[in-house]
Image: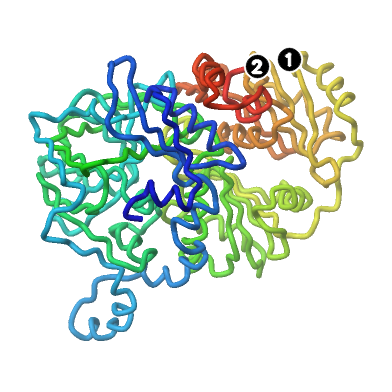
Amino acid sequence: MNDVVEWLKENGNLKIIDTPLDVELEIPHIAYVEVKKDDSRPLLFTNPINRNKDIEYDMPVLMNIFANKELTEKIFAKHPDTVAQGIDKLLKMKPPEGLMEKLKILPELFALKNVFPKRLKSSGECQEIIVTKDDVNLDKLPILKTWEEDGGPFITMGQVYTQSLDGKMQNLGMYRLQQYDKNHLGMHWQIHKDASHFFDQYQKAGKKMPVTVGIGGDPLYIWCGQAPMPHGMFEMLLYGFVRNKNARLVKSITNDIYIPKDVDIVIEGFVDPQKMKIEGPFGDHTGYYTLEEPYPIMEVETITMKANPVFQATVVGKPPLEDKYMGWATERIFLPMLKPMAPDLIDYYMPENGVFHNLILGKMKTLYKGHAQQFMHAFWGVGQMSFVKHAIFVHEDAPELSDDMAITEYILNRLDPEKILITQGIIDALDHTANESLVGGKLGVDATGAEVAEGIQIPLDDTNLLQKFQEIDGNILECKQYFTHTKNPICMITVNKTQSVMSDIEKVYALQKHIKVLIIVDKTNNDINEPYMLLWRVVNNIDAQRDIITKPFIVVDGTNKSEVDGFTREWPGDTFCTKEVLDNLQERGLIDIDETFIKKFGLLPFD
């Protein structure tokens, strides 16, 4: 993969677009549409421009590299399940102390001889061109602005390399970087990340923190940057393990951080712990905007690059996205790492429309009463799994977890309110639903048992059930039931929300003979006939402690929250495409979509 573009031409059905296109909205909108297609392809934009700044860039933009499952497997050069074999040895490896320990682990070290990165004394291709501090100008890079309400342009596939204050630990993370001006970037590392922990060390010492950002090169670098590695382990070890060859690193020009020699662009600088600046808003992979917050500022010291660099970028928003396939690889490869804390775990699955941390399904060999609850606590207590909000466990006889219809039927036939655990714990910094940031409700469902005995007492069709709802509350506008052949059918209703749903929920208890699971969403921007996006909306929109009731039947309030709910934080808006941009791209033949596609994936707002 020395030349990623040529490799993608041969192996990835690369689509090349020569039409001059704007880095603000146009290029991201095309990539956003492409990644949602069944036959999604990687894209190369050869003539990026910026009309507002009157710039014609001299480097292409490469997007949607992880375009589909087949291409992702080709990038790894093997199936992720094969990669997973033996990874537990790598991730448990610690530096030996003393001669005897070194002798004991010699066989393992020899087997992993290609894992350790090599620090070269020479310079790399990424340093063929050097732009010194006085000439640094980030405007010369085709940095994208994806969404109309974004706070500015953002680098979205930046490999952020940092090291601890004592230089003993190095980290590679994938963090977005907002461009403020010609030589400053917003550094969005969240409080739970290793880079943020390093930042704390520099802050306490009163020292500036060196940072180097790589863009491009082997796509596996960016995957390694988002992989859930144990604290303190350099992600380039994972690269060596997958590739079975050492990552070849060169020293940054202005600091001691080592980066891959073959990345296309390198941005070097430092973060002053005393300086913070508002970063965002940013339309994120949750499908919502993350709101403005203060984050550290990176002052750029120098930029180096290949002679003919390619600018890699990704687009985030509502699923499905490129991270669907990156996440699939992560899921398969890191399964062995979950086994020590949950030995009877067979498999797990994080649906992309559950936005990964919002929903996980686990298949397990159930050995005793309370076993599934034990798994819930185990998952919520370790590493990145601690951010999972909703966990559902099934027995080993369940269908494939990724068979959406079959596994949903299995769960609904075993859904018992007595086996639902609601608790509190740590949540992702991007979560917007909890009453306070970083801590919120958790939901665990034990669906490992036998089928429940009773279903709905008196089933009604959608029309008659809606009529009964509207006799109770005229703000209930639509009703659709899913999986009516199961013991726990799902009844979806849309509402014109004028007050808190939960404040007067008792009035619908009169319908308990006709309902087992009631899920409520806003009428605005929700299509009651699109279960894929309804799942996305609901798991994004609920805090289990506040928004779920289990008796006399299960009620889930998936509406947007506001002051009427006693919610005092700002509720963010959806990521929506700009209609004028979509229309223009359609007229020019650069995209081909219809109203069904637009509505299916929530590209535009609707009533």
Residue at 83% x, 23% y is: 466
Type of amino acid under label 2: Lys
Q: Nearer the viewer, residue 3 or 604?
A: 3
Whole-Å distance between the Cαs marked 1 and 2? 7 Å
Compared with 539, 184 (above or below) is above
Please indicate, yes or no, whether residue 438 appears anywhere in the rendered image. no
Circles 1 and 2 in contact, beta carbons < 8 Å = yes
**Which labelled disc corresponds to residue 475?**
1
Type of amino acid under label 1: Asn
Position of residue 176 measured from the top left corner of the image (x, y, whole percent): 34, 36
Please indicate, yes or no, whether residue 424 appears anywhere in the rendered image. yes
Tell me which corner region of the image, top left, top right, bottom left or bottom right, holds residue 235.
bottom left
Check disc 2: other Cα within 10 Å, few if <14, some if 14-19, many if 20+: some
Tell me which corner region of the image, top left, top right, bottom left or bottom right, holds residue 495.
top right
Position of residue 107 measured from the top left corner of the image (x, y, whole percent): 31, 83
Quadrant containing the N terminus is bottom left
Position of residue 230 measured from the top left corner of the image (x, y, whole percent): 35, 59
Tell me which corner region of the image, top left, top right, bottom left or bottom right, holds residue 352.
top right
Q: Nearer the viewer, residue 175 or 218?
A: 218
Q: Seen in the image, is 435 located left or right of residue 374? A: left
Q: Secondary structure at mark 1?
A: loop
**According to the image, label 2 marks what residue?**
497
